Amino acid sequence: MWYVYILKCSDGTLYTGITNDIKRRVGEHNSSELGAKYTRGRRPVKLMYARGMDSKVEAMREEYRIKRLSKEKKEGLCNQ
């Protein structure tokens, strides 16, 4: 299973990504060089939203859709 997720960074910005292991990936964002360059300077990050998808392609499409949303709409997803 693949996941699309949204993280809230320490500076209040949101980061969207995909993974097949959500727990590992959030850990990487918080404590290793394997985390995205964007989140490395904005630690700690907190998982705000995760949605399981059947395939990587579906997760990539959903990630693209979410990245095009306004911050307010992304926050709305996180608050569901």
Image (cartoon, rainbow, N blue to C red):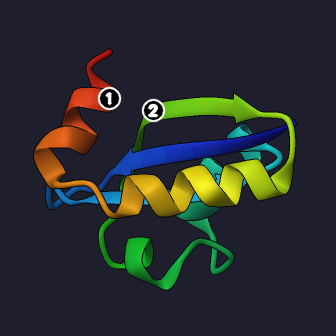
Farthest residue in the top direction? 80
Which residue is label 1 attached to?
A: 78
Q: Are marks 2 and 1 in contact (CB under 8 Å)?
A: yes
Coordinates of residue 74 in the picture (x, y in percent): 26, 43
Q: Is 63 above or below relative to 21?
A: below
Q: In the rendered image, which quarter contains the N terminus?
A: top right
Residue 15 position by quadrant:
bottom left
Residue at 43%, 76% in the rendered image: 40
Q: Quadrant of residue 22?
A: top right
Of residues 9 and 18, the one drawn nearer to the viewer in this rendering: 18
Q: Which numbered disc, 2 or 1, marks the residue that appears first in the sequence?
A: 2
Question: Would residue 54 be found to the left or right of residue 36 on screen?
Answer: right
Helix, strand or loop at label 2? It is: strand
Q: Which mark is residue 49?
A: 2
Is residue 61 among the parts visible in the rendering? yes
Binning the other alpha carbons within 10 Å of mark 2 as few (below 14), some (14 to 19) or many (20 upward) gives some
Query: Residue 20 placed where, x, y %?
Result: 82, 48
Residue 58 falls left or right of residue 71:
right
Q: Amino acid at mark 2?
A: Tyr
Q: Residue at x 40, y 79 (%)?
A: 38
Residue closer to the observer: 48 or 26:
48
Q: Which residue occupies the foreground of this view, 62 or 31?
A: 62
Residue type of the residue flagged with mark 1: Cys
With respect to residue 69, does 3 lie above or below? Answer: above
Whether residue 6 is situated above or below residue 78 in the rendered picture: below
Image quadrant containing the C terminus = top left
x%, y% of residue 41?
Answer: 33, 78
